[in-house]
């Protein structure tokens, strides 16, 4: 299933479509967790199935992270600076042929942040309903923004409304 407006390429030797990250280097930049969700949608599978059936064979450490509560408890940290961010960025680069997916996390700022980064991240998924509504109506489509993962960010800087969780 390919959504209208999605930009991707299929590279020889990759397990997944090479979807390009959305809004890279912009305030609305896509998060790694959002990128994984979008990949699952494009491949018509649940994110947990994508992780278990495609990513785990590429990176054995991920096999231990395919249980349901991982996604509820630790999935949010995929956008941070810790082990999950590093591992998922690396394996998704390999699986898609895309480079520098660590840019979709807080890893570029890891020297400035606490090593576990947990206090930096929101405890629950949050979003701007207006950003998502505009994304759904645009040719590019909606995407999960990295800035929504930061606990200190409570309002959308574009629409000046509170984030919803």
Image (tube, rainbow, N blue to C red):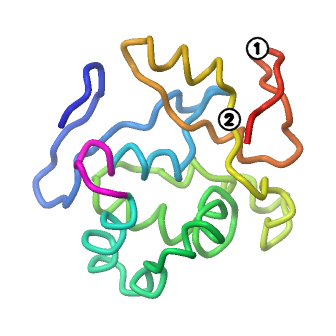
From the viewer's perspective, tell me whether residue 10 is left or right of residue 64.
left
In the image, is residue 39 above or below residue 62?
above
**Image spot of residue 10 (x, y percent):** 16, 44
| Secondary-structure class at tag 1 | loop
In the image, is residue 34 above or below residue 52?
above
Task: Specify the quadrant of the image occupied by residue 117.
Answer: bottom right
Q: Residue at x 80, y 62 (%)?
A: 111
Task: Specify the quadrant of the image occupied by residue 86.
Answer: bottom right
**Which label belongs to residue 68?**
none
From the viewer's perspective, tell me whether residue 89 is left or right of residue 48.
right
Image quadrant for the C terminus? top right
Q: Are marks 2 and 1 in contact (CB under 8 Å)?
A: no
**Image spot of residue 46 (x, y percent):** 34, 57
- Badge 1 is on which residue? 159
From the viewer's perspective, tell me whether residue 126 is left or right of residue 161.
left
**Image spot of residue 56 (x, y percent):** 33, 78
The answer to whether residue 156 is magenta is no
* Sooner in the amino-acid sequence: mark 2 or mark 1: 2
Q: Which residues are magenta?
A: 40-46
Q: Residue at x 15, y 48 (%)?
A: 11
- Badge 2 is on which residue? 127
Which of the two residues, 19 or 152, is positioned nearer the viewer here?
Answer: 152
The answer to whether residue 45 is magenta is yes
| Secondary-structure class at tag 2 | loop
Q: Residue at x 67, y 49 (%)?
A: 125
Q: Residue furthest left?
A: 12
């Amino acid at each position: 299933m390919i959504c209208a407006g999605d930009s991707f390429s299929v590279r020889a030797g990759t397990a997944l479509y090479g979807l390009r990250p959305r809004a890279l280097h912009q305030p609305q930049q896509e998060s790694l967790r959002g990128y994984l969700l979008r990949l699952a949608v494009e491949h018509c599978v649940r994110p947990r199935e994508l992780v278990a059936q495609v990513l785990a064979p590429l990176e054995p450490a991920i096999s231990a992270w395919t249980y349901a509560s991982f996604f509820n408890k630790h999935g949010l940290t995929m956008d941070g600076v810790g082990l999950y961010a590093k591992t998922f960025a690396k394996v998704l680069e390999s699986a898609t042929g895309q480079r520098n997916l660590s840019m979709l996390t807080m890893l570029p700022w890891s020297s400035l942040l606490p090593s576990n980064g947990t206090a930096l991240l929101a405890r629950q998924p949050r979003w701007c309903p207006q950003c998502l509504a505009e994304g759904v109506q645009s040719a590019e489509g909606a995407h999960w923004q990295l800035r929504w993962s930061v606990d200190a960010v409570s309002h959308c800087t574009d629409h000046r409304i509170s984030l919803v969780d």
